[in-house]
Every structure is written in C-alpha cells, then in structure tokens.
Image (cartoon, rainbow, N blue to C red):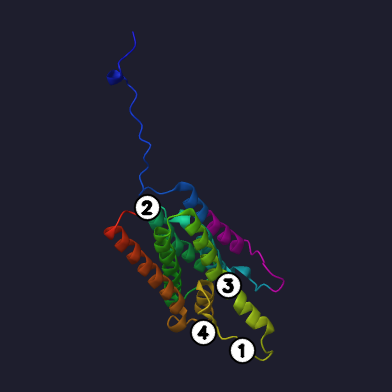
Amino acid sequence: MSASPASSPLPLQSNHRDPTAPTFWPVFAWLAVQMLALLAAALRVSFSARFPMPAERLAMHEMLVVQTVASAMLFPILFRGLASTILVIASAPLMALFAAALAAETRDRRLIAFCVLVCAWLVALAMWSWVLRTTRARLYGVAAALLLALGGVVVAYLNREFGGAAQTFEWHRHALLGPIMAGLALLETNEVSGPTWEFVGAAVLSGALACGVRWARRRSGPAVS
C-alpha cells in the first residue's frame, strides 16, 4: 500500500535561489587571480627584459593591473548579489595590503588612497552590473570596461614611445586615461589629489546616474527583466 503525498518523508525542494547569496565560482576566480599576482611578485617573476629589481617592488603595480582588468572582464557575474558584491569589494583592499607588504610600502597616505581608488572603480562596475540586465547589454558593458581599463594604457604607451625624445612623461596628464593610469600616477607621483580622481569619480557618477534612471523607470512602470 503506497504512502499518501501528505505523509511523504521527503521535504519539498525549492528551485528558487536566494538572490542575496554569494556566487562561489566568480568570487573564487576573483580571489584566485589576485593570489596569482601576489605569487608572481613573491617569486620575483620578471615580465620584461628590463624589469626593475627586486621584482617585488612592483607588487602594487601588478595588483592594480590584475584587479582592474579582472574586474572589467568579470563584473557582470561578480556583482550578482549583495553578498558577492561585498566580498569582491572588501577583498580588494586586503589584497592591496598584501601587495604593499611585498613592495615594502611604508607611506600610509598613498596606500589608503590606492585602496580607495580601486574600491571606487569596483563600486562603479557594481552599479553598472545592476543597470545592465540583458546578455547583450552586459557583453557591451564588458567591452566598454576593458576599453576604458586598457585603452588609456595603450594611448599612454604610444605617447611615450613615439613622442619627442626629450619629452617628459607627465603622470598627472595621463591619469585621466583610465583607472590603471590613474593608479599608476598615484603610485609614481605620490599625489593623492587632482587628476588622479577625475576618471574614477566620473565612473562612479555615471553609474549612480544610470542606477537612478533604472530605479525611476521601475517605479513608474513594469519591472525591467
């Protein structure tokens, strides 16, 4: 005689996932790529023929590039929930502190500014991740984020390579060319104010405006899928 459905000992399973729960693999990939950057600095891996020695002196520079590029590539899946967003943003300054220890960075003011700069870039990406809802829009977002992150580096390199032989490389002027150049300008000049913050400030402002527009549309009409 079969048991009735009401007396079944098996609990009912829900297919609905908590949207605030952290996503394991994206966060794991985010942490792993930063650990690889730390490992490369600790092992004194030289990335060019004239790499400065000892190589760990550039640990913060390497961490800046890895955090910026990895976040630009992965931001649609990194910031899927509140818990994931908090973990991703909170881990960035922690990894920066590890890199600073390898680089023997002793200037607290510059280190704090560096952490704030990276977190501001991540906050901007988190806001845009909430705004971009469709797969196509997110792919466009990844392409735009990578262009902003790496395009300025390419422009600065071309300017340095093909500029005048006696031309002095002005970090303050090139700090406007994206988050990587802003971070490098901060590390190279030790200036925590001025053009260094203009790009990331604009990125945060644009993300906040986009979030405001989406929120207003949700309040005035059907929810955007």
Kind of residue indicated by mark 3: Gly
Residue range (magenta): 32-50
Q: Please name the residue that numbered disc 1 is placed on.
A: 168
Where does the image place residue 102, in percent across and percent down from the top left? 54, 66
Q: Judge left or right: residue 145 versus residue 44.
A: left
Q: Name the mark nearer the viewer: 2 or 3.
A: 3
Q: Secondary structure at mark 2?
A: helix
- CB-based contact (under 8 Å), mark 2 and mark 3: no
- CB-based contact (under 8 Å), mark 2 and mark 4: no
* Mark positioned earlier in the residue sequence (3 or 4): 3
- CB-based contact (under 8 Å), mark 3 and mark 4: no
Residue at image point 51% right, 61% down: 140
The residue furthest front is 221
* Mark positioned earlier in the residue sequence (1 or 2): 2
Q: Please name the residue that numbered disc 3 is placed on.
A: 151
Kind of residue indicated by mark 2: Ala
Q: CA distance from mark 1 to mark 2?
A: 45 Å
